[in-house]
Amino acid sequence: MRAMRVLQPAPAPQRPLALQDLPVPSPGPGELLLRLTACGVCRTDLQLAEGDLPARRLPITPGHQAVGVVEQVGDGVAGWRPGDRAGVAWLAGACGVCRRCKAGRENLCESAEFTGWDRDGGYADYLVARADFAFPLPAGFSDLDAAPLLCGGVIGYRSLRISGIQPGGRLGLYGFGASASLAIQVAAAWGCEVYVVTRSTHEQERALRLGAAWAGGYDTAPPVPLDAAVTFAPAGDVVLHALRAVDRGGTVAINAIHLDGIPAFPYEDLWWERSLRSVANFTRQDAREFLQLAADIPIRTEYDLYPLEAANEALLALAEGRVNGAAVLDLTGSVGPRA
């Protein structure tokens, strides 16, 4: 099978992924073998490929927004059959017995494993995943449309929940990539007023098309105090912009697995019971809730398509801010070469 793998992290312009021909893996007990049709390209993949996110093992196949068809079912698997459509996301497994798992906080499990970081991910023709961490996908979404839901969508949904935003509240979104473009649709369905802050005028225009009440750059504060904000850009100074925009008692949720550091700031920016919260992974319950919500709204996904062999180009486009919404790898071979 084909797989685009990180052999050694390197900057995106140096093409850190290498195409390899590997044997098709076999599912073990409790696992599924998926024949993949699509995989979303996430900023976390870029951070892993470039080394900002330290690799847990090398070589590794990145990709944690994988969609495919069940090819084989391992021993002891219930609820899945060959031919079923399934999605695999960032959380690849948790112990299930620690106090965090038992409290419904498996995203904080110290033994958790992650797709494309601990286990080979979806930049390949086949993927082995734990059956209990795979998800049925809404029938109304094609494989390509479903892929961006599995990370940007789910983690964006958890970020909204962590922020504490209530229906009808004033919400700030800082940065407007794949995750924010899905989160705004959830917030709009909840009747929120959404204020988007992003450097890109193209993204500002897209935010307004998706229902934002206002969109502007970092040099202009939102016109009203915010009840909550979510930051998507992996830059600490953006967190401070958001913190200064939230009202008394407001929360800023940081949607990032890697951040370049938060600059020193005066205590007055945090006072009046403002809060900073990090968003760490998600639970399977988050994923189930969001996928149902995505079908109910219904959420629209926007993406640029790349063939598997052009995964380096997809990462470079992401690094340079040239992606329209999300980037998705078409693993069916129907998308031709891309320079």
Image (spheres, rainbow, N blue to C red):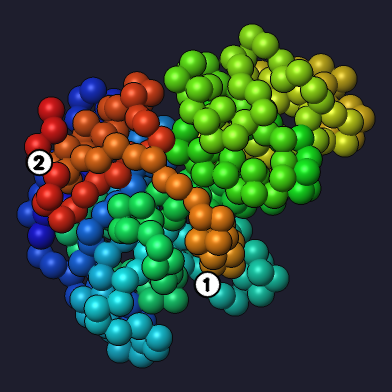
Circle 2 Cα neighbour tier, 10 Å, few/some/many (<14 / 14–19 / ≥20): few
Q: Position of residue 200 (x, y in %)?
A: 48, 17
Which comes before the other along the chain, label 2 or label 1? 1
Q: Position of residue 48 (x, y in %)?
A: 36, 39
Query: If the image is split into quadrants, where does the N terminus sit?
Result: bottom left
Amino acid bearing label 2? Gly
Measure how far apart labels 2 and 1 are at the Cα level: 41 Å
Q: Position of residue 21 (x, y in %)?
A: 7, 54
| Among the 4 quarters of the image, the one containing residue 249 | top right
SS class, disc 1: loop
Rate crowding at label 1 as few (under 14), some (14 to 19) or many (20 or more) other CA atoms within 10 Å. some
Question: Looking at the rendered structure, which numbered label has been put on residue 95?
Answer: 1
Q: Nearer the viewer, residue 154 or 280?
A: 154
In the rendered image, which quarter contains the C terminus? top left
- Determine whether label 2 and label 1 are within 8 Å by CB: no
Q: Which residue is at a point 78% across and 30% down the rendered structure image?
A: 226
Is residue 39 placed above or below 177 in the rendered structure?
below
Disc ID at residue 336: 2
